[in-house]
Image: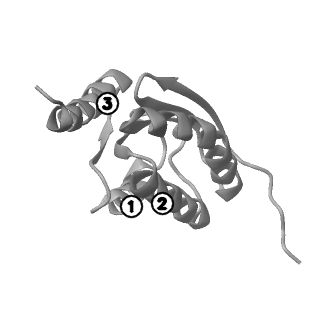
């Protein structure tokens, strides 16, 4: 018998030009990550049709999650980079967020050799950093 769990945590999604922004309240489990992946799909498709884009997650509450949730999140990020034009990712983690020291290495490992990734204290700094990658990528392919 497989045990079914309710999604723990909550999230809110929006697009800001070439950024997919997720505000997430943790801790979260695999069920929440699956729901998030399902709800991001049409937004990711829209962004990918427009070209390169980046992911910005603003974490509140706790960064802690289950190992299964981290595995699913890693699979989703790999798919987005390889198949849907995602070129960078950032997470906003303030000092009030629990679990940063425990989970930071897992997130860094997830993005190693995948795409540029970093943690930030505020969303504005993260967005500027992400848009620098997007602008650089655009400048590589622009015709002068």
Q: Nearer the viewer, residue 29 or 127?
A: 127
Q: Secondary structure at mark 2?
A: helix
Q: Would you identify the image quadrant in which residue 90 lies?
A: top left
> Residue furthest toward the right?
1
Report x, y in % for residue 131: 28, 29
The answer to whether residue 113 is seen in the rendering is yes
- Give the residue pinned by disc 2: 74
Q: Residue at x 83, y 63 (%)?
A: 4
Q: Quadrant of the C terminus?
A: top left
Q: Nearer the viewer, residue 6 or 49?
A: 49
Q: What's the distance in space between the residues labelled 3 and 1, CA to CA?
A: 18 Å
Q: How many marks?
A: 3
Q: Residue at x 49, y 44 (%)?
A: 98
Q: Secondary structure at mark 1?
A: helix
Q: If you read the primary sequence from the N terminus, does the residue marked by circle 1 or circle 2 appear first?
A: 2
Q: Residue at x 62, y 48 (%)?
A: 37
**Cβ atoms at labels 1 and 2 below 8 Å apart:** yes
Q: If you read the primary sequence from the N terminus, does the residue marked by circle 2 or circle 3 appear first?
A: 2
Residue 110: give its label: 1
Q: What's the distance in space between the residues labelled 2 and 3, CA to CA?
A: 20 Å
Q: Residue at x 71, y 54 (%)?
A: 31
The answer to whether residue 61 is seen in the rendering is no
Residue 132: give its label: none
Q: Secondary structure at mark 3?
A: helix
- Give the residue pinned by disc 3: 126
């Amino acid at each position: 018998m497989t045990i079914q769990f309710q999604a723990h945590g909550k999230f809110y999604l929006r697009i800001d030009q070439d950024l997919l922004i997720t505000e997430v309240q943790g801790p979260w489990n695999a069920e929440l990550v699956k729901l998030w992946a399902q709800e991001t799909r049409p937004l990711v498709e829209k962004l990918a049709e427009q070209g390169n884009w980046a992911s910005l997650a603003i974490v509140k509450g706790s960064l802690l999650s289950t190992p299964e949730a981290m595995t699913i999140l890693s699979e989703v990020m790999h798919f987005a980079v390889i198949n849907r034009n995602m070129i960078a990712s950032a997470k906003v983690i303030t000092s009030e967020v629990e679990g940063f020291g425990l989970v930071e290495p897992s997130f860094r490992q997830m993005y190693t050799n995948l795409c540029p990734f970093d943690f930030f204290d505020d969303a504005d700094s993260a967005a500027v950093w992400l848009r620098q990658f997007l602008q650089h990528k655009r400048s590589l392919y622009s015709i002068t």
